[in-house]
Image (cartoon, grey):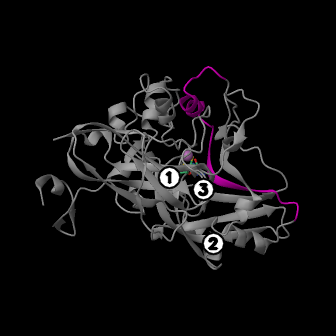
Amino acid sequence: MGEDELEGDWIHGWPDRKRAELMPSRDAEGRVIMARSPVLDLEGLITPTDASYIVTQLEMPDPIHPDDYSFSLFGEIENAVEYSLEELRRLPGRTVRAVTECAGDDAAFFDYLQDRSNNPKPSLRVKQEEFGTWRRIDTEEQPEFDPSAAGMLATGLVSAGEWIGVPLSEVLQRAGVKDSAVAIRVEGFDEGRPDPMLQFLSVGRDDFEVVDPGIINYDKGLPMDKAMDPDTILAWSHNGEYLQHVHGAPVRLIVPGWAGNWWVKWIHKIEVMDHMPDCYHQTHYFVSGKSPDDPEKKMMTALGVKTLIKYPRDEDSPIKTGVHSIRGMAWSGEGEVVRIEVSTDGGESWAGAHVEYSPDKWLWIRWSYLWEVDAPGAYSILARATDEQGRVQPQTEWNFQRKHFDGIVPMDVVVEA
Ligand SMILES: Nc1nc2c(c(=O)[nH]1)N[C@H]1C(S)=C(S)[C@@H](COP(=O)(O)O)O[C@H]1N2
Ligand SMILES: [Mo]
């Protein structure tokens, strides 16, 4: 093994490859509060827990000991109940492998695709230090609004994992849901005052009014259909271990296909409601529309359909003439990805790529395409996915908060002899 492959990592007393490292943002105590995943340096379908992205909208809560933990279930049901972790674990379990993607992942690519000359291309490899801090939630003072830093760091907010828990529907059916039920409001025990800076960074300007709900708990009101989907589960296990605190221990919600913000962490209350609740992170944030004062803002739910080219990226240039395996991942918010097409001439012609078989419809798939390139020069490489519903990438139009980006991003690669 080459010297550079051995740098730093010795596993069980043996030299090993370099581990892929999370790109974290920390609080004043050095604790990680947000992190981007090193997606390009990972192999396979499951993101190791220590390389999975982390997002917190409010403040990180203090951890709760699993023995002291319970959540309450109340509202439009026959019997209100309290579940300890042990009681939850006695119910029939379910394992779900799924992609989690933050609604804001790759947001800056919206601008880049609209106007390539005035917007730098976001890099998935740029680290925190190279940009200064991203966001510290423990600072009293509002940092200066800097639109350029934000988008560049909103990459790598996607991971995939194996989650074990109990279907939310199982818990609801046992409690006897009334016919009046419309939504299930799931609340976390984390609280805080939503930082308007997050909206400013997301919209790209700070000249508009942001609703201030005061101190709130993070919550989401899941529509009944999705709540009753057997794959929507209350999970306590992630990638073969108990959930880590940053990922919502002791119990979090898994909502396959829907953006990360639906996956409520640190569950504390589950309320069955006869109307859609007015959750801040549902009616004011994570909404689509034309501008902050668009009267027709809509809540955003399922992700579109999207590819990630892992090789070759712009940064891999120059590459040599010969055979290259163009490869990457693809996922969809509405089930399995069934087709990947690749173009090496900027979108003039497309060819089918190999799509690896996968039994898990909510997980991303691996795809690859063998490219024989004899002529040196500049190439524009594209990939686009189609899912089992026949939805072709991209599905999500530009929206003022720039959420759910699923556009086709060209890789600009230089080939030399
Ligand atoms: N209670 C609670 N749940 C939450 C959040 C939060 O701030 N509080 N953030 C959401 C957002 S925006 C995302 S993208 C995912 C991130 O999950 P992860 O940190 O485990 O990757 O959690 C969601 N669940
Ligand atoms: Mo998110």
Residue under label 2, please give it.
Answer: 166
Q: Earlier in the sequence, mark 1 or mark 2?
A: 2
SS class, disc 1: strand
Question: Where's the N terminus, which quadrant?
Answer: bottom left
- What residue is at 86 percent from the left and 70 percent from the top? 78
- What residue is at 70 percent from the left and 58 percent from the top? 269
Q: Are marks 3 and 1 in contact (CB under 8 Å)?
A: no
x and y, in percent, of residue 156 in the image: 43, 46
Check the image and report above or below for 105 versus 145.
below
> In the figure, residue 289 lies in which quadrant?
top right
Q: Is residue 385 visible?
A: yes
Residue bounds of the magenta highlight: 179-208
How packed is label 1: few (under 14 Cα within 10 Å), some, or many (20 or more)?
many
Q: Which mark is residue 390?
A: 3
Check the image and report above or below for 137 versus 88.
above
Mark 1 vs mark 2, CA separation in Å: 31 Å
x and y, in percent, of residue 58 in the image: 58, 43
Magenta stretch: residue 236 in it?
Answer: no
- What residue is at 37 percent from the left and 31 percent from the top? 132
